[in-house]
């Protein structure tokens, strides 16, 4: 479903060149929950940006359902992200002036869905993250764990084939982290959806089906997680 084939990403800052990803091959299929771990600066976020079509590789290939990201225009990649990929970030990234339901509905509203339909779909997604009772609440009325559940609901609103999470438990206490990890572990479905998560959370890997370790821009190991 998502493939990196000897993918390379080089950043240039003035005269300095950073080889963030130096040749990584990784295939993720629906049904998988892939955890990516590695030291700070090892290239995890860069890898995530390549898999999420936020960026294109400097070398090698990044392929989503058989289509090379490099062959797509910025507009096509943007539509791919909007319609087929959900994102969850460490910082929740909810809009403070919108209710939980409106935050979840926002991607659909921006895509042109009518308000009634968008809010109906948002309600389904809030139910899925067990937050139906918080639909009319604003972010500052919610705990960190609840805000992140709203963010997960928002990531699901377009029924994406991949949910990409960058340190989703980085701002949460242990109990809230476990809730989010449990929730994420229920999202992958064979033939339908994969979850990919970058994390430093030592508990994180045990919730996944597969653990990938990255070091210095290279894949160090890639193993199934024994349950
Ligand atoms: P991680 O997520 O594992 O901390 P990153 O993918 O963020 O690693 O970064 C890998 C390397 O690439 C680091 O050396 C980082 O400083 C560099 N880097 C990341 N993004 C950029 C950028 N936009 N411009 C320049 N260098 C970057
Ligand atoms: P951090 O890794 O510190 O948690 P963020 O999660 O805020 O940082 O953002 C990670 C990266 O994803 C940033 O480069 C940011 O520009 C990008 N990003 C954040 N929100 C979105 C979004 N809704 N859609 C696309 N890209 C985003």
Image: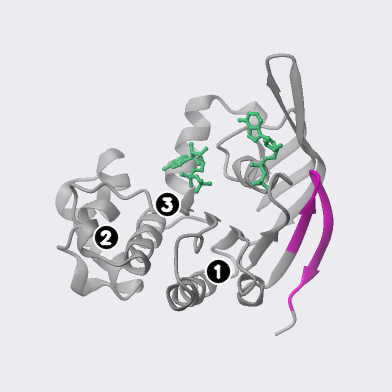
Sequence-wise first label, 1 or 3:
3
Q: Residues within 10 Å of mark 1 (few under 14, many from 20)?
A: many
Q: How crowded is mark 2: few (under 14 residues within 10 Å), some or many (20 or more)?
A: many
Residue at the farthest top position: 15
In this figure, which residue is indicated by the disc labeled 1?
188
What residue is disc 2 on?
A: 121
Residue for point 74% across, 45% down: 4
Rendered location of residue 182, percent (x, y)? 50, 77
Q: Do the residues labelled 1 and 3 touch (CB within 8 Å)?
A: no
Query: Is 162 situated above or below 71?
Result: below
Residue at mark 3: 91
Going from the N terminus, do you reach mark 2 or mark 3 first? 3
Q: Measuring from the top left, give residue 184's x and y in whole percent.
A: 50, 69
Which segment is the magenta one? Answer: 212-225
- Magenta-colored segment: predominant secondary structure: strand
The quadrant of the image that shows the C terminus is bottom right
Closest to the observer, 19 or 35: 19
Ligand 2 contact, mark 3 (Cβ < 8 Å): yes
Residue 66 in sight in this render: no
Q: Is mark 2 on a helix, strand or loop?
A: helix
Judged by depth in the image, the label closer to the viewer, 1 or 3, is 3
Classify residue 11 by image quadrant. top right
């Amino acid at each position: 479903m998502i493939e990196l084939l000897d993918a390379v990403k080089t950043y240039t800052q003035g005269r300095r060149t950073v080889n963030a990803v130096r040749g990584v091959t990784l295939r993720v299929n629906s049904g998988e929950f892939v955890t990516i771990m590695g030291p700070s600066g090892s290239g995890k976020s860069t890898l995530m940006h390549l898999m999420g079509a936020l960026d294109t590789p400097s070398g090698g290939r990044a392929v989503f359902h058989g289509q090379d990201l490099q062959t797509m225009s910025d507009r096509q990649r943007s539509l791919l992200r909007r319609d087929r990929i959900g994102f969850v970030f460490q910082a929740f990234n909810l809009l403070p002036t919108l209710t939980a339901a409106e935050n979840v509905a926002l991607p659909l509203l921006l895509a042109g869905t009518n308000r009634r339909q968008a809010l109906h779909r948002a309600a389904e997604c809030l139910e899925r993250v067990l937050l139906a009772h918080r639909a009319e609440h604003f972010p500052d009325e919610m705990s960190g764990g609840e805000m992140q559940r709203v963010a997960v609901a928002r990531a699901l609103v377009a029924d994406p084939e991949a949910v990409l999470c960058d340190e989703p438990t980085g701002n949460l206490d242990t109990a809230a982290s476990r809730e989010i990890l449990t929730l994420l572990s229920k999202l992958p479905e064979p033939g339908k959806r994969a979850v990919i998560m970058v994390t430093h959370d030592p508990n994180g890997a045990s919730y996944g089906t597969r653990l990938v370790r990255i070091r210095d821009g290279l894949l160090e190991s890639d193993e199934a997680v024994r349950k």
